[in-house]
Structure formats: structure tokens, C-alpha cells
Image (cartoon, rainbow, N blue to C red):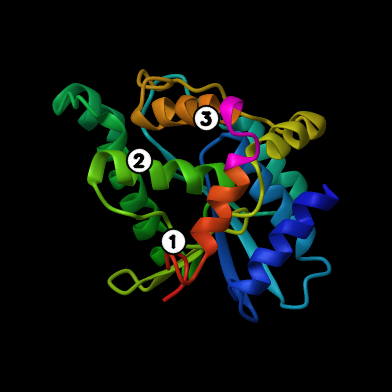
């Protein structure tokens, strides 16, 4: 965990993600990334120089048989308030709209539900579990399918919602999260989305894995390029 905590602290300080007495909601999906973020932020707050409090929030997409009891127990053990936002997103995306590319609409609706919920709870910052691999995949998705150079920023302020989005795990590689989440036996939920493993992001992930076989450490170089102010200007104004 020392490596993960160190990388998170670096990102949080370099991009001034947290201010004194922030109330931060971790957007929990039930996957390894968001659960690791919640666990790590809870550890960090014990010795981080800026005081903050945590809450956890999850958007229930409406799939039948979804059980959040293990995540609830984790939050209880961490003494972190846990909120479940009920929605009918699954019905809208898969039954009513029958989207050919369901991930885009689902993501948009889920973020909207999250933003509305945290405003009602009086929370000013929302933390997502996006990591370094996600940043690179998003860059390739943007180039290949949108024809532009774009990836998410470490910190984003949404004027309309008056919410700040932060991504403390941007310097952490997915392989480290996988290792630590297994070691800690985090209560990762089984994915019950019918589109799981068939998205454009999964295609890009496989493409990058193929690139790594031909160009070792290409991921590190791409991440360095994303941070390069002069060439890309993707993470800085």
C-alpha cells in the first residue's frame, strides 16, 4: 500500500485536489478501482496535512439481484457513511433506448445522478477511481473515435453543478491496484452489466496490451506525454 499512498499523495498535492475541511464523496462502482480509492483515502486522512472527511456513494443502475451488503460492511468498518442512489438507468439504456453503444449513455446518466445526489448531501468534491491506464485509454478513445486529443483532467470544476471532480489515482497503474485489492480482499462486486467486456474501451485496452508487447514501457512514455505542458497541454490550463 505504501506505493499507492505515495502516488496518491503526490497527485493530490501537485494538483491541489483537497482543501481544508473538504467533504469528499468517493464515487463507488463496486469495482476494484473505486474500492481501493475509498480504502486508500481513508488511510491517507490520518496523516495528510489537510483535513478532510469522506463519504461513499453508489448509483444503483437497477439491475436485479444487486447486493451491496459487503460494501456496506466495508464502509461500516471504515466508519464512512454510505449512500445508495436508486435509478432506472439500466431499464432506460437497455430496454427503452436499446443503445448500440450503451456505455456512453449509461456513464452520462450515472454521472448526472451522482452530481445531483452529492449536491443534496452538501458535498463539494467527488472523487473518481480513474488511474493511469484509464487516462491513456481515454486519450486513445478520443483520438480514434472523436478525432481530437483529449483525456480527463486530474481536477475538474463543474460550474453548473458547483462540484469539483478529483482523481487521486492518476499516477497509479492498474496492475498495482489489482495486486493490492486482491491482497486486501476488497469486496469487489461481480459485474452484471450485459455490455461488460464488449465496449470500445475494452477494445482499446487490448490494443494497448498488444502495443506493450512490441514497445516495452510505452505506457509510461504516453503518460509522460500527457503531462507534457508544451506538447499536449492536456492536464494544465
Q: Secondary structure at mark 2?
A: helix
Q: Residues within 10 Å of mark 3 (few under 14, many from 20)?
A: some
Given the current orientation, which residue lies at the most extreme front position?
214
Q: At 43% across and 27% down in the image, what residue appears?
A: 202
> How many callouts does the rendering have?
3
Which x, y percent locates residue 164?
A: 45, 69
Task: Give the alpha-carbon distance from disc 1 to disc 2, as whole Å.
Answer: 28 Å
Disc 1 versus disc 3: nearer the observer: 3
Name the residue tied to disc 1.
Answer: 118
The first of marks 1 and 2 along the sequence is 1
Instruction: Give the class, few, some or many, for how many residues have Cα within 10 Å of label 1's Cα (few <14, many ≥20).
Output: many
The one nearer the camera, 118 or 231, is: 231
Q: Residues within 10 Å of mark 2 (few under 14, many from 20)?
A: many
Q: Which dot, 1 or 2, sits closer to the camera?
A: 2
Query: Does residue 129 show up?
Result: no
Question: Of the numbered discs in the image, which one, if any, rests on residue 136?
Answer: none
Q: Is residue 125 left or right of residue 73?
A: left
Measuring from the top left, give residue 27's x and y in whole percent.
51, 50
Q: Answer left or right for 37 relative to 68.
A: right
In reply to whether residue 215 is colored magenta, the answer given is: yes
Is label 3 or label 2 in front?
3
Residue bearing mark 3: 211
Residue at 32% over, 46% down: 142
**Which quadrant holds the C terminus?**
bottom left
Is residue 151 or residue 114 the one in the foreground? 151
Outermost left residue = 97
Judge from the rendering whether residue 230 lies leftward or rightward of residue 53; answer left or right: left
Q: Earlier in the sequence, mark 3 or mark 2?
A: 2
Residue indicated by mark 2: 141
Identify the residue at image location x=76%, y=28%: 182
Q: Which residues are magenta?
A: 213-218
Q: Is residue 109 left or right of residue 86?
A: left
Amino acid at each position: 500500500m505504501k506505493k499507492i499512498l505515495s502516488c496518491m499523495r503526490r497527485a493530490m498535492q501537485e494538483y491541489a485536489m483537497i482543501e481544508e475541511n473538504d467533504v469528499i464523496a468517493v464515487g463507488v462502482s463496486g469495482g476494484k478501482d473505486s474500492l481501493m480509492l475509498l480504502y486508500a483515502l481513508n488511510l491517507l486522512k490520518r496523516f495528510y496535512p489537510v483535513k478532510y472527511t469522506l463519504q461513499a456513494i453508489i448509483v444503483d443502475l437497477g439491475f436485479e439481484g444487486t447486493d451491496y451488503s459487503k460494501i456496506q460492511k466495508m464502509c461500516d468498518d471504515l466508519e464512512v457513511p454510505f449512500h445508495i442512489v436508486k435509478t432506472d438507468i439500466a431499464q432506460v439504456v437497455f430496454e427503452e433506448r436499446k443503445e448500440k453503444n450503451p456505455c456512453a449513455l449509461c456513464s452520462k446518466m450515472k454521472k448526472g445522478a451522482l452530481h445531483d445526489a452529492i449536491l443534496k448531501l452538501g458535498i463539494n468534491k467527488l472523487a473518481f477511481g480513474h488511474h493511469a491506464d484509464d487516462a491513456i485509454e481515454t486519450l486513445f478513445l478520443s483520438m480514434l473515435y472523436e478525432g481530437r486529443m483529449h483525456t480527463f483532467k486530474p481536477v475538474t470544476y463543474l460550474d453548473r453543478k458547483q462540484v469539483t471532480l478529483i482523481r487521486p489515482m492518476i499516477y497509479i497503474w492498474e496492475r498495482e491496484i489489482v495486486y493490492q485489492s486482491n491482497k486486501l480482499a476488497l469486496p469487489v462486486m461481480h459485474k452484471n452489466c450485459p455490455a461488460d467486456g464488449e465496449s470500445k474501451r475494452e477494445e482499446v485496452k487490448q490494443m494497448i496490451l498488444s502495443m506493450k508487447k512490441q514497445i516495452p514501457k510505452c505506457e509510461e512514455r504516453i503518460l509522460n506525454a500527457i503531462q507534457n505542458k508544451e506538447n499536449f497541454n492536456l492536464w494544465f490550463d
